[in-house]
Amino acid sequence: MTTPRVLLVEDEPGLQLTLSDRLSAEGYAVDIASDGPGALAQVQSRSYDTILLDVMLPDIDGFEVARSLRAQGMATPILMLTARSQVTDRVTGLSLGADDYLTKPFDVRELLARIEALRRPAPRQAWAVAEQYQFGDVVVDLRRAELTRGGTALDLSAKEFQLLRYFIEHRGATLSREALLQDVWGYTASSSTRTIDVHVA
């Protein structure tokens, strides 16, 4: 089996050491970039299974790095690490292409769970669904994983599209955060997490 490779983009030496040691112990190959330009250079020379991307970086911040990677068509899952607790900051990161976020300080066990969840494919449903749905001028093409509004394509991260599909497949049902975390993200966590809220926003 190929060793999963993670790019850790973090400028704090202590956190670099702590996270790289723990990830290595869990079986990941870890590369480190200390700033935005370094991260962009790394992904040009090597492919990664997951990118752990700090928001507060020198030269180019994590938001701009995420924007640039997605503009290049790179689909690698991005987990943003941020000390910012404002929902608007998290929404910004997710809207720029991040698949998930984790607010510092965090438990490394939760970080590992989220990395594993991002690496797993979305669970397949046992029932058949139509390939296309329309809500007003919004069209969701499940087969092509495309979303348009008024004929204009809208950009969604992979996790956002999985969440939208889940809502469609469970339309009319009341869904708990716990169910969404388990079925869409693939892990369990406290219902106090705001991952769901931010993605929906």
Image: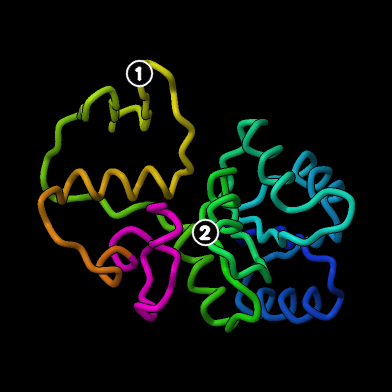
Q: In the shown orientation, is residue 140 left or right of residue 35?
A: left
Viewer-proximal residue among 25 and 89? 89
User: In the figure, 98 relative to 137: above or below?
Assistant: below
Percent coordinates x, y for residue 155 in the rendering: 48, 33
Residue type at mark 1: give it: Gly
Front residue (pair 152, 132): 152
Residue 132 in sight from this viewpoint: no
Q: Earlier in the sequence, mark 2 or mark 1?
A: 2
Picture quarter with the N terminus:
bottom right
Which of 168/14 is in front?
Answer: 168
Dividing the picture into quarters, in which one does residue 32 lie? bottom right
Looking at the rendered structure, the secondary structure element under dot 1 is: loop
Query: Badge 1: how crowded within 10 Å, few (<14), some, or many (20+)?
Result: few
Identify the residue at image location x=73%, y=65%: 30
Q: Is residue 37 left or right of residue 97?
A: right
Residue 169 spot, x, y in % from top left? 17, 46
Residue 70, magenta (yes or no): no
Residue 8 percent coordinates (x, y):
73, 62
Q: Is residue 66 above or below residue 123?
A: above
Residue 150 tag number: 1
The answer to whether residue 96 is visible is yes
What are the residue bounds of the magenta stretch?
181-201
| 4 or 74: nearer the viewer | 74
